[in-house]
Image: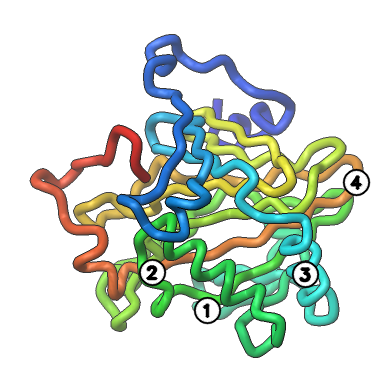
Amino acid sequence: MTQYERYQSLCRGPWPLPKEYDSELTCFYYDNHRTPSLVIRPVKVEVVFHKPRIFMLRGILSEREMDRLKELAGPILKRATAKNADSGKDEPAHYRISKSGWLSSKHDPLGYVDRIDRRIEDFTGLTMSTAEQLQVVNYGIGGHYEPHYDFGTDEASFTDGKDRNRIATVLFYLSDVELGGATVFPIVGARIQPFKGDAAFWWNLKKSGEGDMLTRHAGCPVLVGTKWVCNKWIHEGGQEFRRRCGLTPNEESYGHSL
């Protein structure tokens, strides 16, 4: 089965997980080493896949926060683009059908964008100073994003600039989807069904700084309804003392931590 066929199969329905994964799929409350804001309200975390490690943060956004993000993004939504490997430019692509808009604090005098950025920093422990703006994306009927990596796979993405590559992804689900719209990882067979208010989190880069090729993922076509998501791409620059290199090139994090 080709990778594209695996993507199509996962979009039709979940695959059974290997039995050896059972002991690794856990739930826990997380306060990121007693971070003050999380001591009062720890994050509800579910490990939904083992390798790559994919976390679901349950109920991380309130109804008002989700409404506010959609309200702010509505007037600035444009046809989403993807980087053309030949030209190096961001262009509309047949494999990404959606509308998107970028939000910063200047768009929001009420402070919701800043509040969400602070929450991401609290639960990841990563600085937002080199992260990209929040991107709100709307998928209508048939909207989808075929398999791709969030990190740049070219050599320059790993070496150029102070911000460097995308180390991690936070993907907030701002709506339920009546049918379709799952997030799937075709190389490993993982599938996440959107639930409003939840967020998915995964590391795009290993502790060695190499790209994790297992994180190739896709947004399945929306068959009924509409899908709203918001993603935060966090960059490697500035994280040197927040996510340190491991003792071995492929060291991974385990236990009750992200």
Residue on which the image places disc 2: 235
Camera-side residue of 55 and 167: 55
- The circle on residue 225 is 4
Would residue 14 appear left or right of 234 to someone viewing this image? Answer: right
Camera-side residue of 126 and 204: 126
Q: CA distance from mark 1 to mark 3?
A: 36 Å
Three-letter amino acid code at disc 3? Arg
Q: Is residue 11 visible?
A: yes
x and y, in percent, of residue 184 in the image: 60, 38
Three-letter amino acid code at disc 1? Ser
Q: Is residue 197 above or below residue 193?
A: below
At a point 70% along the width and 33% down the height, the residue shown is 11
Q: CA distance from mark 4 to mark 1?
A: 35 Å
Earlier-in-chain disc, 2 versus 4 = 4
- The circle on residue 68 is 3
For label 4, the SS is: loop
Give the number of the mark in front: 1 or 3.
3
Q: CA distance from mark 4 to mark 3?
A: 20 Å
Quadrant in which residue 152 is drawn: bottom left
Residue furthest front as drawn: 40
For label 3, the SS is: helix
Residue on which the image places disc 1: 87
x and y, in percent, of residue 66 in the image: 74, 61
Three-letter amino acid code at disc 4? Gly
